[in-house]
Image (spheres, rainbow, N blue to C red):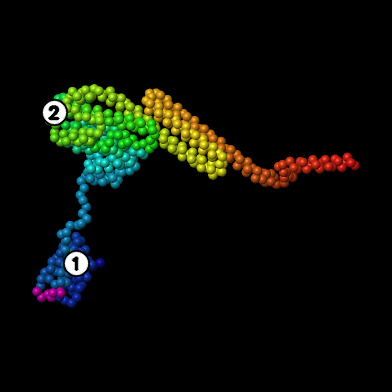
Amino acid sequence: MIPTHIIFHKIRKLTLNITSTNNIDILSVFYEHVGRFLLNDPDYKDLMREMIEMLRETSKRPNLKINDKLAINNLLLIVEPPTTKVKSLQTKPELSPKSQFIQRLIRVELNNTSLPLVVNLSLAHPELINYDNIPALAAVLEAYFSKYKKIVVYTVDTTIENIIRGLELNDYRMNRVRMAQVKFVAEMYNHRVINFKLINDLLYRILCFGHPNNQPLPDNWDVEIDLPDNYFRIQLCCLLLNNLKSIFIDTDIPSKKKAQNRAVELKKRNDINKDLLGVFITFLQYYLFCKEKPLPVELDFKLNDLFAKYKSIPTVKRYDTLQEIGKRLQESIQRKREAESYLDNSDEALVVDDDDDDEDVAEDYDNTDDIDLDEDEGDEEDEDDEDDESEEDNDEESEREDDTSDIENNGVSEEDRMRLEAEKKFMDDLDKEYQKILIDSYDKSSSQTSSNRKKLLMPTPRKYLLKKPNIKQLQLPSDTKFAESVLKEKEISDKIVNEL
């Protein structure tokens, strides 16, 4: 509405006559409202710069008072505030392209379909976390063990495959990664995710992988991935065994219910684990003779720690010559095969026993619920009968368990043991069916009696269905007194007729 030349003419006039009355106040109001706009707008920027320079020249006049100079400085601060040299406290970090991609994956791409893949990949790579936090990762995997076994299987398989891949490449740059993977396997065993048989197989795989017929030979320079001057495989085996808390079965398979026969079975498996460890330690000493001597000092320390940890196991012995080791291995090869086959069979049997124990507990709970319902109905005699029968059944089951445990302790064959278990299961099923039939028959009888009582109390349907009944409803008594009274009256009437 106002031409531009008029505005800057007024500013020039006020600036030149700055000492006049109220000129400074007028300039202050003008600069406070439109000063920054005129200075930053491209159309008025040059003219506004001239006005500011004129104002600065005016402030240098010697005839100005101190108050006028302070007012002019305030005008300049309003138009051009001083720039601070302090950096902003909330600086946005500059992310690399890889970091930006990871940020997008977590914030945008993560959904229900990609979640299983992310969980599997995050649990199967222990080398990506701190070495001291590997036990915590194994504890997380243990929490998934009961409900999400598929994730556990994937994690274990991926870790074993990565270890084998490291044996194939034999790259010294991956030594820390391979050590983290072996440490993770040991922690999975300590948290009862895997058993000792898998540990035993992995130990032999580490030593024998890549050799012809899986048989390491002394001074064999033909195997490039395991030369005689490479001692890293021995370090992996020592790391795995030194990180195991125990080799006994209680750390392998958690048992909720321990019967006498189960205790015998577990003790036998403990002895087998000791034998397997002794055989492997002997084979490890044979593998040491396949390497160049002398061994590194660090490796000697690790071997000494290994023998010191398992010195309480009688099968773990240290040999000095290769002949003693070969003789010991020949004696223990057949026993090792028998032990491995026994572990394969006993693992399946223990899993079946755990399932049967859970089913028995659930059925016992259901039976107790049925007995409580019978108590509420008030039939004390039937309740006593069922309690007696259940006590007799429990006595018979305990006797059968004692018999089977005694027979197993005496050392029967595998076929007889399977036959006894089948008979025991058949008898248990018969007892359960018999109890079920008794409970069902009692429920039916109680329902019939209650329905009969309700029928007696209900009125006749004719009273509601027929509006005008043609037949008079008679409430006849249920006993024979009415008939007897009718007969007596008839006899009396006959006597009177005869007398007349």
Front one among 79 and 146: 146
- The residue wearing badge 1 is 78
Q: Residue 152: x, y in percent?
A: 32, 37
**Callout 1 environment at 10 Å: few (<14), some (14 to 19), or many (20+)?**
some
Question: How many other residues sit within 10 Å of disc 2, few (<14), some (14-19) or many (≥20)?
Answer: some
Q: Mark 2 points at which residue?
A: 292
Quadrant of the frame with the N terminus = bottom left
Res. 393 visible in picture? yes
Q: In which quarter of the image is residue 421?
A: top left
Please report contact status of discs 1 and 2: CB closer than 8 Å, yes or no.
no
Q: Is mark 2 on a helix, strand or loop?
A: loop
Residue at point 34%, 37% (across, down): 254
The answer to if 149 sits in the magenta stretch is no
Residue name at image x 55 percent, y 39 percent: 382
> As shown in the figure, which amino acid type bears the numbered disc 2?
Glu
Q: Which residue is at the front of the view, 59 or 445?
A: 445
The magenta-colored residue range is: 62-68
Please report the residue visible at 37 percent of the width from the left and 25 percent of the height from the top.
411
Above or below, 326 relative to 131: above
